[in-house]
Image (cartoon, rainbow, N blue to C red):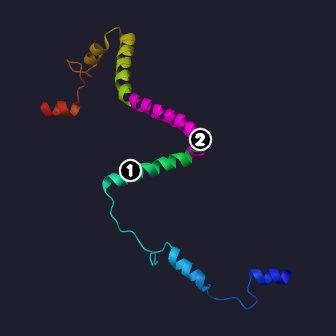
C-alpha cells in the first residue's frame, strides 16, 4: 500500500527538473507577472466610473474590516444607518463647535471679569470694535 501511495504522490522514476507541460501552460496563462501572455485590458475608464469604482472599493473595505458583510440585509441597513447618523453628527459638530466654543469662551470671560465677552475681548485687543477677530498680519498690512 505504501508503494501505491508513493507512486501516486511522487513519480517512481527520478525527480523531474522541470514542471510538467500542463503546469507550464497554466503558469503562463494565469501568471500575474509582466511577461505573461494573458490578455491585458488597456481600456481607459472615465472619471465617473473610476470614482464609482473607488466608492465601491471603500465600501467593500468597510464591510470586510468591520464585519458588516456577515449580516443579513436588514441588519446591514440598521448598522449602516447608525454609521451614517454618527458621521453626520460628527460633520455637524465640526461646523457648529467653533462658534459654540467662542460663545462659551465669552461666557467664561463674563464669569471671570464681570464684563461682556465682547467688551473683554475688545479690551484685551483680541477683537476689534465690530466684534470681529483682528488678524495681526492683516492689521500690519493695512497700517
Q: Alpha-carbon neighbours of circle 2 within 10 Å: few (<14), some, or many (≥20)?
A: few
Question: What's the mark number on residue 52?
Answer: 1
Task: Identify the magenta region.
Answer: 68-93
Per the model, the C-alpha gap separating discs 1 and 2 is 24 Å
**Residue 128: image location, x then y, percent:** 21, 21
Say which label, 1 or 2, has the lower sequence index: 1
What residue occupies the far left of the structure in this picture?
Answer: 143
**For the residues carrying marks 1 and 2, which lies nearer the camera in this image?**
2
Please tell me which residue lies in front, 6 or 65. 6
Please tell me which residue lies in front, 64 or 23. 23
**Residue 108: image location, x then y, percent:** 39, 15
What residue occupies the far bottom of the structure in this picture?
Answer: 13
What residue occupies the far front of the structure in this picture?
Answer: 73
Which image quadrant: the C terminus?
top left
Is 127 left or right of 100, judged from the image as shown? Answer: left
Q: Secondary structure at mark 2?
A: loop
Above or below, comparing residue 76 to residue 48 in the picture? above
Amino acid at each position: 500500500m505504501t508503494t501505491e501511495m508513493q507512486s501516486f504522490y511522487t513519480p517512481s522514476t527520478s525527480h523531474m527538473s522541470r514542471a510538467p507541460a500542463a503546469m507550464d501552460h497554466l503558469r503562463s496563462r494565469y501568471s500575474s507577472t509582466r511577461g505573461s501572455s494573458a490578455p491585458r485590458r488597456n481600456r481607459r475608464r472615465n472619471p465617473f466610473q473610476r470614482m464609482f469604482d473607488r466608492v465601491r472599493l471603500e465600501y467593500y473595505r468597510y464591510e470586510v474590516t468591520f464585519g458588516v458583510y456577515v449580516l443579513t440585509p436588514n441588519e446591514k441597513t440598521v448598522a449602516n444607518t447608525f454609521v451614517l447618523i454618527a458621521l453626520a453628527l460628527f460633520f455637524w459638530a465640526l461646523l457648529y463647535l467653533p462658534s459654540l466654543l467662542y460663545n462659551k469662551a465669552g461666557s467664561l470671560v463674563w464669569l471671570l471679569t464681570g464684563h461682556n465677552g465682547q467688551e473683554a475681548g475688545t479690551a484685551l485687543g483680541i477683537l476689534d470694535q465690530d466684534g470681529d477677530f483682528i488678524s495681526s498680519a492683516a492689521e500690519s498690512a493695512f497700517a
